[in-house]
Amino acid sequence: MTDIDGMARLSICGIGLVLASVVMFAQTPTGGGPGPILGIVEIPDMFSFDPNTGEYAPPRSSLRLFVQPNWDSKVFANISSREAIDDAGFSHEGNGALVYGRENGYFLIRTSRGAAWLSPHNAGSFHPYEDLVSGDLSYVTEAWDGFVSESPGSALRTRMPQRQPQGEVARVKGFRTVRGKLWVEIEVISHSFCESDEPPKIKARGWIAAHDKANVPTVWFAARGC
């Protein structure tokens, strides 16, 4: 093999790793919501995937949202476009609305017109945040400050050395709520199974707050896979 061949192969490998990272760390929800993200709720009338076309089918009907989480509430808005909903993927072919609150079976979601309550009659399955980030393709987002704590809420914190700017793969080990704030126990690891079958090395281990001050999640997941 010539030096040129070797360089070409290295370049291809490098591109592959970059692409894997781009897929892995894409589509992290932004902040600015009415609270921390509690999960994703399916809305069949809005997000119905058509396997024949490989795209989402047109909305079946407009979506009625309420000012308060009960049937006696005033109507906040009738949404006819799924683009108006603050959404995220929960699986390879599934999208739903990000949830910022739950009460009386209702879900607080965000739209282009503001936050409002979704009736349980229009809601499908709910996917809690804890379940979403507990899979094999989780990662720490740019909202993480790079520190881990020995215990949830502890002031004893350690900075992870040589943090990658594009993100870090993480394994979620547990959850705990302290003073109303959710904490996540993580292991930051060298790579995911998308990049290598070799056992990953643990780069850091500890507890981090699940959301930053702007309610951006510090741990998220790759819904679309590798």
Image (spheres, helix red, strand yellow):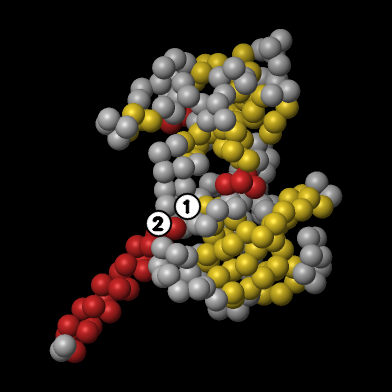
Where is residue 91 drawn, in percent x and y? 46, 42
Q: Is residue 183 above or below residue 105?
A: below
Where is residue 5 drawn, in percent x and y? 17, 83
Name the secondary structure under disc 2: loop
Q: Is residue 25 visible?
A: yes
Where is residue 154 drawn, in percent x and y? 81, 65
Mark 2 highlights which residue? 226
The span from disc 2 to disc 1 (Cα, nearest Å) is 7 Å
Q: Residue at x 80, y 60 (%)?
A: 153
Q: Residue at x 44, y 28 (%)?
A: 47
Callout 2 crowding tier (Cα within 10 Å): few <14, some 14–19, many ≥20: some
Q: Is residue 92 left or right of residue 207?
A: left
Contact flag, marks 2 and 1 (Cβ < 8 Å): yes
Q: State the image quarter where residue 156 is shown.
A: bottom right
Where is residue 146 drawn, in percent x and y? 63, 68
Q: State the image quarter where residue 124 is shown.
A: top right
Name the secondary structure under disc 1: loop
Mark 1 highlights which residue? 222
Q: Which mark is residue 132?
A: none
Three-letter amino acid code at disc 1? Ala
Q: Residue at x 45, y 74 (%)?
A: 198
Q: Is residue 77 above or below residue 96?
A: above
Three-letter amino acid code at disc 2? Cys
